[in-house]
Amino acid sequence: MKQLFAFGVAIVLVICLYKSWGNPTGAKLTLGIAAGENELDANPERSRYVVDRDADGEGTVRRRVEVALRRHPPVGEEAGGAEVGSKDGHIDEVHQAKQQILALERKIQELEGRIPRKYPDVTFLNYKNRKRILITGGAGFVGSHLVDYLMMQGHELIVVDNFFTGRKRNVEHWLGHENFELIHHDIVNPLFIEVDEIYHLASPASPPHYMYNPVKTIKTNTLGTINMLGLAKRVGAKVLIASTSEVYGDPDVHPQPETYWGHVNPIGPRACYDEGKRVAETLAYAYAKQENVNVRVARIFNTYGPRMHMNDGRVVSNFIIQALQNQSITMYGSGKQTRSFQYVSDLVDGLVALMASNYTLPVNLGNPVERTIEEFAVIIRDSVGCKSKIVELPAVEDDPQRRKPDIARAKRYLDWEPRVPLKEGLIKTIEYFRKELARSNHSQRNIFVPETTEKK
């Protein structure tokens, strides 16, 4: 840190001395250090380079270069004749000063990149309580929020993702942390690591994504699940399989309890995902029965929140983006279909509670408050404050008409139910999408501000 500070000061001194060549006797350099400032004369311009001191006394280099060009009329008998002739020279000098300041700013940015990153203060766990946890699909929407939660609790996290729908920027705020490791890997291929728990979330979850390559979707949910169950068997790890409400298909029973076997078209366009998840559940319980693998199965209903994929084709992201851009909000079908939407933090609480429990049968994790698609479109339009029209498009094949979870099991065995109101969650989600649409370069990164690691 001291070397960076000395290097930065040296750059400023060189520039300021160079710029004071026209009036060396009046050179003034202002160098602000903490609350005090040592000043040397500089004319015709002042340059300021600020170095703040933190609580430990270490200097933190911060880019803050202020240039205020001050021009004073020449004093003396020769001033009159030189004033007009020196205007062009002063303009060139100003231009050169700006170029040098830009070069200095770029150099300071480079130096800042070498400063060690700071991370949120995570809970310290000793070796008895700290777990090594694998999260497949951990760079995705739900996975990245689960990573944040478990990292703040103090566990060691290994994230595995092939980045088909996941994004590195969803977990970039943990890169380099001693408790965090990111592996670019496709779980269709075997993985050999040592872990205590496995959250198996890897799989495309939105229709456009899982229909893009249906064979790959089936492989991820079958071969990928076999690999994770095999890993759990080998190392004696507990494994949670992220299933879906899609295992119920277009249900004949409403609301859907875990005991309902479903109404699924095995050869329809959604079958690669629906049947893939049904097979994943079958595999989980086959390994539990035959190999004594400790399994948990979560049937996840519609979830929304920050870090959703911008073009995943799901209701929440579609409606919000269309509303933010003042486009028509498009509904597939009459809009009378119903869904239940839970905020992502509620889902994460449910997943963690299920993993920690002794309950081994499938558990619905969703919001029992049912809304029509049309009603949901109106809520989003009003929350954004736009005047978008709501337009009906032809219905999608095999689109479920009613979807509402029965969460009696979750309440009884996990003491879990959703807590975040829809409008509160939508405000955070809309703000995220608004920032994403306004983002114009890679330097505008995600900022993770932990709220709490405890339930309210």
Image: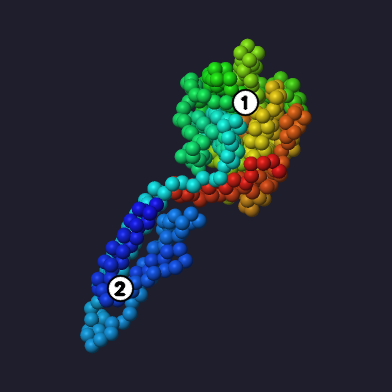
Q: Determine whether the residue tagged by mark 2 lies in a helix, strand or loop.
A: loop
Q: Looking at the picture, how far across and down is residue 235, in whole percent?
A: 55, 20
Residue type at mark 2: give it: Ala
Q: Is residue 336 visible?
A: no
Residue under pointer 1:
240
Residue under pointer 2:
27
User: Mark 1 Cα within 10 Å, few/some/many (few <14, many 20+)?
Assistant: many
Q: Is residue 272 left or right of residue 16?
A: right
Q: Nearer the viewer, residue 40 or 21?
A: 40
Q: Residue at x 47, y 66 (%)?
A: 35
Q: Looking at the picture, how far across and down is residue 326, in whole percent?
A: 58, 50
Rendered position, 68 above or below 204: below
Q: Nearer the viewer, residue 183 or 79?
A: 183
Q: Looking at the picture, how far across and down is residue 32, in whole percent?
A: 41, 66
Rendered position, 133 above or below 168: above
Mark-to-mark CA distance, 1 and 2? 69 Å
Q: Residue at x 73, y 31 (%)?
A: 414
Q: Residue at x 63, y 15 (%)?
A: 292
Q: Earlier in the sequence, mark 1 or mark 2?
A: 2
Residue type at mark 1: give it: Leu
Q: Nearer the viewer, residue 210 or 392?
A: 210
Q: Determine whether the residue tagged by mark 1 lies in a helix, strand or loop.
A: strand
Rendered position, 77 above or below 159: below
Q: Is residue 276 left or right of residue 22?
A: right
As drawn, the label of residue 403 is none
Q: Nearer the viewer, mark 1 or mark 2?
A: 2
Q: Looking at the picture, how far across and down is residue 359, in whole percent?
A: 71, 24
Q: Residue at x 62, y 30 (%)?
A: 396
Q: Residue furthest top?
A: 290
Rendered position, 63 above or below 368: below
Does the residue at mark 1 contact the one at mark 2 (Cβ under 8 Å)?
no
